[in-house]
Image: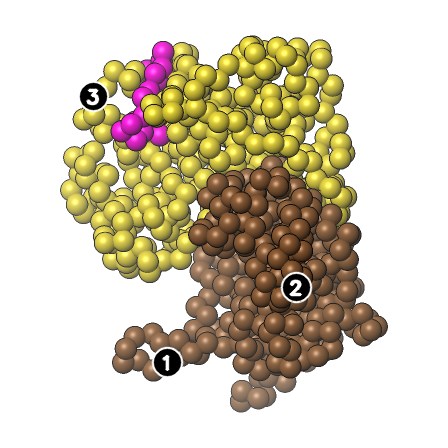
Amino acid sequence: MKPLDCLEIKNLTVTFPLSAGTLWAVNDVSFTLARGETLGIVGESGCGKSMTAMAIMNLLPQAAQLQATGLTFNGQELTALNESEMSDIRGNRMAMIFQEPMTSLNPAFTVGAQLMEAILRHRKVKKSEARERALYLLEKVGITAAASRLRQYPHELSGGLRQRVMIAMALMCSPDLIIADEPTTALDVTIQAQILHLLTEIQREFEMTVIMITHDLGVVANVTDRVAVMYAGRIVETGLVSQLFESPQHPYTQKLLDCIPVPGKTKRGSYLGSIPGRVPSLIGDLSGCSFANRCSFCTDECLNNDPPWHQIGSQRGYLCWRNPEQISPYKGQGVSL
Amino acid sequence: MNDSASTILELSDVVRTFSVSRGIFKKKTKLHAVSGVSLSVQKGQVWGLVGESGCGKSTLAMMILGLLPATSGRITVNEKALHQWHQRNLSRLIQPVFQDPYSSLNPRKTIGQIVGLPLRVHEIGSKEDQCKKVKEMLEMVGLSPRAYDSYPNQLSGGQRQRVAVARALIMRPQIVLCDEPTSALDVSVQSQILNLLIDFRQKLDLTYLLISHNLAVVEHMATHIAVMYLGRIVEMADTDSLFANPRHPYTRALLKSVLLPEPGKRVTDPNLGLEFPNPFDLPTGCKFHPRCSEAMPVCRITAPDAATSPGGYVECHLYSETSTQDRNIDHSKEIA
């Protein structure tokens, strides 16, 4: 781990023991995150992206079992911490923004009480100082009449305002790392643009490290520096955002890009790319490539043996049996259809 | 608009208000969900209806389906007013596909029963015929025959949405109204459902009304687009014109908010301000003026008339046929 790194994850595996066998929710995931960087974790539902976030925050469900050779945050090994040491970090040095502000804000408490809770727990501050910080941040996230908002309850705010409150809440202790789990999925496109614009501005100003978890490739392309594509619990490809969109290597990434219509590029009314089949069961013995049953390049090797990780340079890599020479250059979105 | 011979659905000045109680002792207030929508849909067109949540898209959909009467205005389907249609016959012509395949299918019925229900209601064919038809339909939407006896909870989200499409198409309707058909689905599944809709449009000669907040999807599917804001269509045009030359400031903000899967561009603020206006207390004049970055004095006073634009119209003072200055003078007199 370089001194500039904020977070390093090595071989993270999250499993659930079920009566039918072991469920591999997150399977051997490794990545590092430099300070001030934005990493996008993209994948479809059930691919383990939220579980990865929960593992970092140590908020996994009770039944989950976590194994990792390293989970280092600011030079501190998280797996070695007990619950009270962990809760000193959570909400303080790392914070989370959840998808649905309606369900993640407590309806019984005022916005002000919820905003001030974390800073009163983690810092030795007076209530008046906490209130001042809350006011400052509400204005920072673009909320007008902040003083009266502090006395309001979550149901009195619109969805966009609630998400702004969530962001302000995450910023209260000026954390080093923010994990945003689908922060704009429940919002209208216009509000989504506002919130993402705000998040990127704030990140730049406070020099924060951000993990952006999303299923929306448009969000990834516009907000992140680096991307990890997850499929069936594994990271199948990583790269700088420009590399990933221009020359995706893994068949899943290529097909995923073909699935989305791009205004101005995809011919109107033409058939979109699609991925046949469905995500395999993650229970039991998972030998072989998890994408094999849906891949057009599948061979016997793919079905029986785990694919190797090809590292290209320091930033880029993918998990596939095909060598870089075997992969024909990606024609670009909308062109290959 | 064009030759009326092929007009399959026409809305003229459709209004829907709801009386809403805002407390036991308070007087009921009127909520204007849809205020004066006119739209003419020709056979074979695909109309995309876009706008923020709360703009009245779904209320409009309910009225077109005949599930909610209009407060005033006229909806005609095949040149016959909606209230003259028997609901049974109307449902043979217009069928919906809803957003959430998890809640729109009855969990206690098998897929065969769900898809076959319209046939039983309309008493079409013998039991064997119905069963055969359902199985054909399931095959057409790409489901295995095994699905016939399964229950919705045994299917994935994409398969359930295929069932919803099968149920809508089994009566061979002419119009299919899709209300956010892919919003609850993953991207790879979304493309499968969109492909299915594209396929059936050609095969079965369908007309679609597609309500969606995903503008990339609307751009891909629709031949025409209507942009709604607070109960009114503020701009309508064919898809090419609208995307090439969005005229209404709201349309421009919407298009600016679309995040394309192309890296290198940063997210820009659409400049729409913070608050969605209170639907109980609508702004005067142009309803969009409190959020509009190009608002003029006249916008606060008068609602704009529709100005024709290539392939449609736009309701905005920026494009009024009479010059804005004249309007300013007119209204200062009125107020005085």
Residue named by callout 2: B124
Q: Which chain, by letter, is brown?
A: B
Residue A82: mark in rendering:
3
Residue bearing mark 1? B28
The magenta span reads A54-75
C-beta proximity under 8 Å, tags 2 and 1 = no
The chain coloured yellow in the image: A
**SS at badge 1:** loop
Q: Secondary structure at mark 3?
A: loop
Residue B117 position, x and y percent, is 57, 59
Q: Residue at x 31, y 48 (%)?
A: A105
- Given the image, what chain letter belongs to the residue carrying mark 2? B
For badge 2, the amino acid type reads: Ile
Q: Is residue A71 magenta?
A: yes
Secondary-structure class at tag 2: loop
Q: Percent from the top left, x then y, of residue A324? A: 67, 12
